[in-house]
Amino acid sequence: MSHGDTVEALRRLRDFGAIVLDGEGPGQGSPRGASEAGRRGAAADPEKSMASGGESIPLGRDALQQVESLPLYDPAELDEPVELTSERKRRILDLYYRLEDLSYYALLGVSDQADKKQIKSAYYLLAPEFHPDTYFRKQLGSYKQKIEAIFTRITLAHDTLTSRQRRAEYDGYLEQTHKNRAMAALIEQAPRDIATITTAVDATVRAAFADPRDVAASPGRYSSDRPPEAQVAAASSARAAAPAPPSHERSAVDGGGAAARPAAAPAPVAPAAAPAPVAPAPSAPSTPIAKDRRETFARKLTAGLRRAPAGAPSTAAPVAASPAASVAAGVAAAVTMPKGPGAVRSPESMRAVEVLKARYDNARSEALRNQIARHSEAARVALERNDYAGAANAYRIAASLAPDDPELQKVSADVQRLAAATLAEGYLKQANYEAQTGRWFDAALSYAKVCNGRPDDAGAHERAAYATLQSGENTRRAVEFARRAVELVPASVEYRLTLALAYSAAGLAKSASGELDRATELAGNDARLRGLVAQAREQAKRHGKQV
């Protein structure tokens, strides 16, 4: 779950009264009917909030006053005995735990169109609050490290945004990050679109067969005798069951997959008026016309029911529990029929039910063909504008609706691979920048995503292993990435050294020693490679692992 999703989930729990946040009393959360747009805006990605030319969202000096956000820290941290006020503690904790989610622009509280003078002004306004000298000779406990981290990040933001070259690189990184997120979200949406479309197709066809009088409707005495307003309501119900446009049609991803505008929320629907109470009519036989219609329809669908001789086994064949059978059963149940033990359908009745099932199946097949054609065309258009994620989404839907079409399955698989490769290339650019700036945890995640799209890329696996080691997280995972790199290119000295370091960090000294020995053999008389092997041994020693 992403940070934004987590914040939104916590916000909803607070709105329903399921949790109480630090500093709030019972009932002080947002009202249950609070603006949904406001809640979404508060939990939105800070980087996305900095659209070109848009207003900045200050998350430094005035964070708590201007942005409603849920605390990401453990409230117990506020109880640490240090020489800081409660308000200052909250300010430090709020900003510290959001550092990795904030762009440099959001951190300084400036627009991405701000000039150098505006950036410097924002920095000099914010930096003194977190400068270590401000807290000289104060007991800070764990807050000392947090204050230093905030000041370091603020300084990095200033240095990056006031350098033309570094700022251009950073802006490219932000743009690439947004493209990657948009493409990934669109590809991941396909399974939900498939389920929605399949359900809607079935609902649409069922709606057309829901009323026996609609099934047998024709000019004359057997057409539906419902009043016009009831027929309009039935038609509206069928239209409501039509599938909503899938995500790839709602999106406006252009070129590399730039993010689309969020779809507008549906307008609220006024509640239907309650039907007026109707006094029960006195029990009386049905009118001759209604009775004649019912009997005629019963003869056509069920041909009455013949009673089997006493003691004779039933010869009725079981009906499969398919959508068509369900519709047929519902129609048959709507007809007044004799009841009793041993009742069986006549051959004419069974043939009528089979005809109805065939009509239902044909209608469903036609609806599916229309959906397949629609999404195949959407995929073709997406490919023409190089929207590989949108094309992959559309082809995946079409292929799921036509599992027996080998050509469509092949095209879908090819486009899926193309989209995955394009997304992997985007993640590689993102990961390289994160590694360049020392953001090793983020780099490890991005390199891992590159490996997902490029399972046979040895270089990506080695970089994922190295970034994971640098982040100090999950050394076993680093071993897995490094092993895969060595499997793909066994003669690489660099890959074996990374594997040796991963083994060493994981406490596998014997395996690390073996990899270093193999790297030494592969290095031969190459002075540079022998130097790398020596450095790796020294690095392992510094970590307390004699290899």
Image: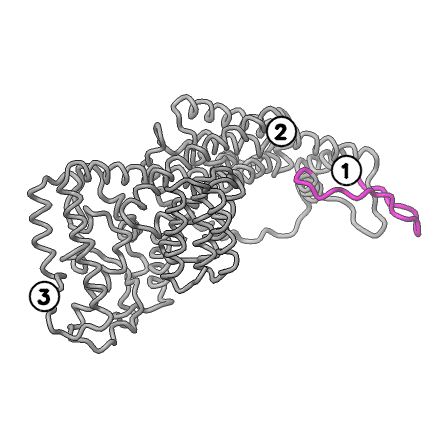
| Image coords of residue 475 (percent x, y) | 44, 57
Residue 301 image-quadrant placement: top right
Left or right of residue 212: residue 201? left
Q: Amino acid at mark 3?
A: Thr
Magenta stretch bounds: 304-324
Q: Amino acid at mark 2?
A: Ser
Q: Nearer the viewer, mark 2 or mark 3?
A: 3
Q: With respect to residue 291, does 140 lie above or below?
A: below
Would residue 386 be seen by someone viewing this image from the given angle?
yes
Q: Which disc is residue 302 wearing? A: 1
Q: Nearer the viewer, mark 3 or mark 1?
A: 3
Q: Name the residue rendered at 11%, 51% in the picture.
A: 123
Q: With respect to residue 463, does 544 lie above or below?
A: below
| Image coords of residue 104 (percent x, y) | 20, 47
- Closer to the N terminus: mark 3 or mark 1? 3
- Closer to the N terminus: mark 1 or mark 2? 1
Magenta span has 28? no
Give neighbour class at mark 3: few <14, some 14-19, many 20+ (Cα, 10 Å). few
User: Which secondary structure is most common in the magenta stretch?
Assistant: loop
- Closer to the N terminus: mark 2 or mark 3? 3
Give neighbour class at mark 2: few <14, some 14-19, many 20+ (Cα, 10 Å). some
Q: Amino acid at mark 1?
A: Thr
Q: Which disc is residue 365 wearing? A: 2
Would residue 230 be seen by someone viewing this image from the given angle?
no
Using the numbered discs, state the Cα–Cα distance from disc 1 to disc 2 in whole angstroms.
26 Å
| Image coords of residue 322 (percent x, y) | 69, 41
Q: Residue furthest top?
A: 384
Query: Relative to the observer, which residue lies in front, 341 or 180?
Result: 180
Q: Which residue is mark 3?
A: 134
Using the numbered discs, state the Cα–Cα distance from disc 2 to disc 3 in whole angstroms.
73 Å
Q: Name the residue rendered at 70%, 30% in the picture.
A: 358
